[in-house]
Image (cartoon, rainbow, N blue to C red):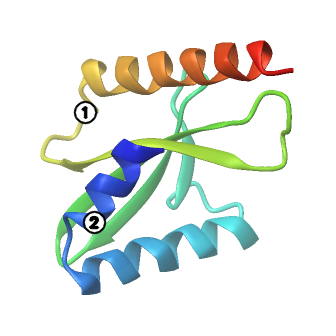
C-alpha cells in the first residue's frame, strides 16, 4: 500500500535493505520475532530491529486470496507498546481494502 511504500522510501538504503531482508526471512520462517499477529486483531506486524531502532510494518492477510500479505504502513517504534492509533489505522485500511475487493468482483 502507498503509506507502507512512503515509509520505506523515507528510510536510508541500509535500513530499507534490512527491512526487505527481514520480510524475506519472515516468508520462509515462522519466527514471531520477525512477523507477529497483534492479539485481538486481524493485524500482523513485521518486526525489524536495526542499529538499536525498532521498525514496524503493519500488515494483514488478503482475506479472499490468503496467499499474500498487504502492508498498510510503517512506524519507528519508540515505546514498548504499539500505539492504538497505529493498530486502528491498519485495521481501517484492511476493512477498506476488503470492501474495495468485494465491489470489484
Q: Is residue 41 visible?
A: no
Q: Position of residue 33 (x, y in %)?
A: 50, 59
Q: Residues within 10 Å of mark 1 (few under 14, many from 20)?
A: few
Circle 1 is placed at which residue position? Answer: 81
Residue at image point 44% right, 27% down: 90
Left or right of residue 34, residue 77 in this image: left
Q: Is residue 81 visible?
A: yes
Residue at image point 27% right, 86% down: 14
Which of pointers 1 and 2 lies earlier in the amino acid sequence?
Answer: 2
Q: CA distance from mark 1 to mark 2?
A: 25 Å
Circle 2 is placed at which residue position? Answer: 9
Q: Position of residue 96 (x, y in %)?
A: 55, 17
Comparing 39 with 24, the one in front is 24
Where is residue 99, by image quadrant?
top right
Q: Position of residue 1 (x, y in %)?
A: 48, 44
Q: Is residue 11 above or below residue 89?
A: below
Specify the farthest residue to the left: 78
Do the residues under discs 1 and 2 have CB atoms within 8 angstroms?
no
Left or right of residue 56, residue 24 in this image: right
Q: Nearer the viewer, mark 1 or mark 2?
A: 2
Q: Residues within 10 Å of mark 2 (few under 14, many from 20)?
A: few
Q: In the structure shown, which secondary structural element does the residue marked by tag 2 occupy?
A: helix
| Count of marks overlaid on the render | 2
Amino acid at each position: 500500500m502507498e503509506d507502507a511504500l512512503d515509509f520505506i522510501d523515507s528510510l536510508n538504503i541500509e535500513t530499507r535493505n534490512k527491512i526487505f531482508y527481514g520480510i524475506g526471512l519472515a516468508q520462509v520462517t515462522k519466527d514471531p520475532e520477525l512477523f507477529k499477529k497483534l492479539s485481538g486483531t486481524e493485524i500482523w506486524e513485521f518486526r525489524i530491529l536495526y542499529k538499536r531502532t525498532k521498525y514496524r510494518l503493519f500488515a494483514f492477510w488478503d482475506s479472499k486470496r490468503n496467499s499474500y500479505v498487504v502492508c498498510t504502513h510503517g512506524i519507528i517504534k519508540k515505546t514498548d507498546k504499539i500505539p492504538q492509533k497505529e493498530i486502528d489505522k491498519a485495521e481501517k485500511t484492511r476493512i477498506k481494502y476488503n470492501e474495495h475487493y468485494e465491489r470489484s468482483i
